[in-house]
Every structure is written in C-alpha cells, then in structure tokens.
Image: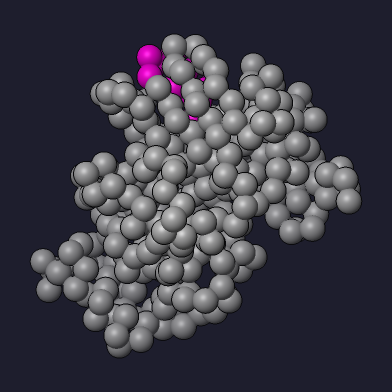
Amino acid sequence: MPAAARFQLVRLNNGICSVRSLEDAETFHPVVGPVAEAEALYVRQLRLRERLQNHPGEFVIWDVGLGAAANALTVLRATRDLACQIRLVSFDHKLEPLDFALQHAADLGYFGGYENPLAEFLRAHRVEFQDGAQSVNWELQLGDFPAWVANPAATSIPRPHAILFDAYSPARNPAMWTLPLFTHLFQRLDPQRACALPTYSRSTILRVTLLLAGFFVGVGHATGMKEETTVAANTLELLAEPLNARWLERALRSHSAEPLREPVYSCAPLTPTTAERLRQHPQFAACQ
C-alpha cells in the first residue's frame, strides 16, 4: 500500500500541520505541533545548546522513533549556529512516515533547507553535511528497536549523550515501554558519559519502569496539554527536579504502577517485591 494511502496531513487546532498514521490511528505531535513540542521536550529540556557549547568532540544523540523527522530536524536547526560535531543515530522500523512527510515538506514547514540531506538519508540511510557552523553525521538503524537494544553483539553505534525517545503510546505500542527494553537501554549507556532521556509521558508506570531500569528520574517540562513530562538520566546532575519522597509514596499507593515486563499493556499496583526495589533505589534510599 503506498504511503499516501497510509498517512495524511492533518491541521491541528492552532493551524499547524502534522502527519497522521491511518493504520495506527495516531497523529504525530497532536497538540502544539512538531516543532513546538520538540523544542520544549528535547531542545530546552536537554539543555542542548548549553551542553554543546561546552562539549569537546562528537556529541552523540539517539533519536528513538524517527517518524517524520521533526524531532531530529528541530534539534539540528536549534543548534546549527554552534561550532560542534553532532552524531545523530535515528531508529525506526519503517521509513514511510518520513517519505510521506518529505513529499509534503512545504505544508509541514519544518524541512526548510534540509530537503536535500533528507533525500540522501532516505536513499542511503546515512548522510553527512555541514549545517551552519555544525557538522552532522546522521545514520539510520532500520529495524526492531527492542530486539536491537537487547542484542549484546550490536555494539557498533557510539553511546549517547542524549536520547530523544518518541515511541507510540504504551497502549498502542507496549513493546517500546517494557522494563526489559529500558533496562537494556540503560546498560547501553557509558557510566562515564552523562546522558539524559526525555519523553512525553508522565505516567507512574513509566517512571517506575525507568527507575527500576537504573535511571534517575525527574519531572519534565510541560508541553501542549501535558502539565508534566518525564526526563531520565544516568546522573542526578542532569535533572532539574528529581522525583522526591512524596512522589514515591503516591507511587506505592497507585493502582497503576507495576512495570510492563512483556509487550502487553496492563495496569496493576506494585507487587511487594517491586515496591521494595523502588524504595531501595539510590534516588530514594536516603529518604527512608
């Protein structure tokens, strides 16, 4: 089935265009639009400009959920005046959303100036180019991300300084939100390389999952209609507002907090074993 039959342009309430997947019944960046969401959730929350200005050598960004490339392009455009080297690795299991979006670049608005690199990226699954003051090395890992991140032999990709995590919702795509996936992802990080991962969800299940996977977890910036999002990191220093003892008490009482261990969406309170592991997490152990 051609991409035009699986995707369509939709105009959001604020007049901005976005892409909708008809087969998945999901609209990308459905409230404020692609650029505003990416700026709030990733560019500002990751303090990318500040970190890049003080970073020697290559800065590695994993873009988990390439989609129509709005997150990646917003990050590049927001930092293109900085003299830096960005290694961008995008993960997705299909390229049809990007192909469709590039065909409608004028309507979407965020491709301006990147059409040629994106056409090469679609063709060769990698592209290198100079973008303002920065140099960009962008590559694609096409396939099943949960399987890739769980494979100890898949070691050719450099470890990240930042992760843009933008999978479909847990109800729609539970395989991307399980405890094994985030545990494997945490194990991919370099303990000596500070790395942060923001994502749009603020659910208790997600935050418990990230904590049990090994991350420190904090309250993320508001975006669209969400008063909070979530940011995780392998060091507390990257979190502006770490989850505290009050949040822990709410999680222990929640009826929807037990992590997904299989790619099947479900809601359940914490088991006694999970609750004890959560209490002993370094983020909370000092509060006991």
Q: Quadrant of residue 11?
A: top right
- Residue drawn at (46%, 18%) of the image: 135
- Residue drawn at (34%, 58%) of the image: 187
Left or right: residue 74 versus residue 284 is right
Residue 215: horizontal and vertical position, in percent? 30, 58
Outermost residue, front side? 153
Q: Is residue 78 magenta?
A: yes
Residue 265: horizontal and vertical position, in percent? 57, 75
Left or right: residue 19 versus residue 168 is right
| Most foreground residue, 50 or 191 | 191
Please determine whether, in this image, residue 26 is positioned above or below residue 124: below
Q: Quadrant of residue 240?
A: top left
Q: Is residue 95 magenta?
A: no
> In the rendered view of the protein, which quadrant contains the C terminus?
bottom left
Residue 30: horizontal and vertical position, in percent? 65, 47
Outermost residue, bottom side? 272
Magenta region, residue range: 75-84
Q: How is the image coloured?
A: one colour
Q: Is residue 109 visible?
A: no
Left or right: residue 275 versus residue 269 is left
